[in-house]
Image: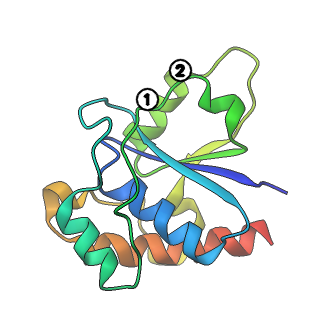
Amino acid sequence: MTQRILFVCLGNICRSPAAEGVFRARLPHLAADSAGTAGWHVGKPPYGPMQQAARRRGLDLGGLRARQFTQADFSRFDLILGMDADNVADIEAQRPQGNETPARLLTDFAPETGATHVPDPYYTRDFDGALDLIETAVEGLRAHLA
């Protein structure tokens, strides 16, 4: 059974920390982390408006800090989930030869939504919509892991 999950977005301040927070709340017995493909926000907490939207749902993201995805993550995690196709492409570009750790879209676990990616609320400003989709996908992921 997959036990270590890494959630990845671009900057690691909105989508991936929110997914990590939802996952940890729903599956506290499994290990989770998040990272960004870009290093702009390394060491910073999640974006304020995302923290506020998460807090309204009972999720505290305040203790999380952004970090950049590294090639070593392929050996540290059992499943890597990108928020959009660009994230997955950036992840795959760092894949070590011979490594078989699955890298998929988080939305693969929410086919009923018809979503092909989690829109970035840093740009769309729809933090609640992103959280709705993330929560649905994490429920699908939970069923997949059961």
Residue 25 appears in which quarter of the rendering?
Answer: bottom right
How many labels sit on residues? 2
Measured along the vertical axis of the image, is residue 25 above or below residue 74? Answer: below
Amino acid carrying label 1: it is Asp
Q: Residue furthest top?
A: 97
Q: Can residue 51 be seen here? A: yes
Q: Secondary structure at mark 1?
A: helix
Q: Position of residue 64 (x, y in %)?
A: 40, 54
In the displayed structure image, the side of residue 65 where residue 128 appears, left or right: left
Looking at the image, do the residues carrying marks 2 and 1 touch, with CB atoms under 8 Å apart? yes
> Residue lying farthest front?
63
Say what secondary structure mark 2 lies in.
Answer: loop
Q: Residue at x 41, y 66 (%)?
A: 115
Residue located at (18% from left, 56% from top): 122
Residue wearing tag 1: 90
Residue 94: mark: 2
Q: Position of residue 117 (x, y in %)?
A: 39, 57
Position of 88 relative to 137 (above/below) = above
- Residue 117 in view: no
**Residue 109 or residue 112, whichever sits in front:** 109
